[in-house]
Image (spheres, rainbow, N blue to C red):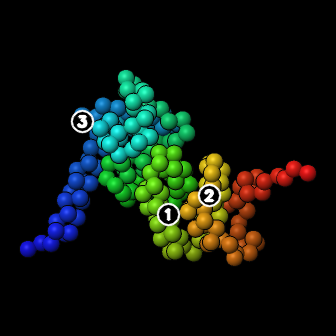
Amino acid sequence: MKSNSVENENTFNSLSEDLKFALNNPLFSDIKLKGNDGEEIQAHRVILVSRSEVFKRILLNESTQNVIEFYEFSSKILHVILEYLYTGKVTETLQIEIIAKAFHSADYFLLEQLKHQMIEFVLHDLKNKENNINISAKILSQLLECMDTPNNKLVESLCKIIDFAPLKSIEYNNLILNIIIKPTKL
């Protein structure tokens, strides 16, 4: 006899897989999300509204529109958000190369659990990388460039990784110096 926790996990995984199938599937979709690259993604209002307060506000204000455009995010980033909204996790769409913008979008959509998953993803990914200081510096620079409030757990985690590294060991192409070094007023 299976325990309740195993049954619950199997039910969640089955539901998650079923909802992943609905993601970007035109069958019964009733809205499209358009990234700044012009690509449209099929979605379902009921899922967006039930999983995100931000989408709820957007769709209440723009209830008659069939396409919602996001000028700040690419379709690749919107796929990350939608995968999380549909399945409760990100496994297929998240990549280290887009983590800064994806984290920014999770912040924009007020998805704290997704932000936590992204931090875990980055820390796990960096643990296995030889040049984790340079990757950390690059992600940190990208985060500081795209986010209004860089005070967050991901920035803190990245700073801890590069905190004791000599500046010489960080490749300059991984830094956006005008973001890191702010001019001071005299």
Residue at left offset 52%, top offset 56%: 99
Q: Quadrant of the rendered structure where residue 49 is?
A: top left
Q: Is residue 95 visible?
A: no
Position above or below: 178 against 33: below
Label 2: how many residues lie within 10 Å, few (<14), some (14-19) or many (20+)? Answer: few
Q: Position of residue 179 (x, y in %)?
A: 72, 53
Residue at left offset 74%, top offset 75%: 166
Q: Quadrant of the rendered structure where residue 162 is?
A: bottom right
Amino acid marked by disc 1: Ile
**Residue on which disc 1 sits:** 119
Label 3: how many residues lie within 10 Å, few (<14), some (14-19) or many (20+)? Answer: few
Q: Which of the two marks, 1 or 2, is nearer to us in this view? A: 2
Amino acid marked by disc 2: Asn
Q: Is residue 110 visible?
A: yes
Q: CA distance from mark 3 to mark 2?
A: 41 Å
Q: Secondary structure at mark 3?
A: loop
Q: Position of residue 82 (x, y in %)?
A: 38, 46
**Residue on which disc 2 sits:** 151
Q: Which mark is residue 27?
A: 3
Image quadrant containing the N terminus = bottom left
184 and 35: which is toward the camera: 184
Q: Which mark is residue 143?
A: none
Amino acid marked by disc 3: Leu
Classify residue 96 as left or right of residue 180.
Answer: left
Residue at left offset 12%, top offset 72%: 2
Q: Secondary structure at mark 2?
A: loop
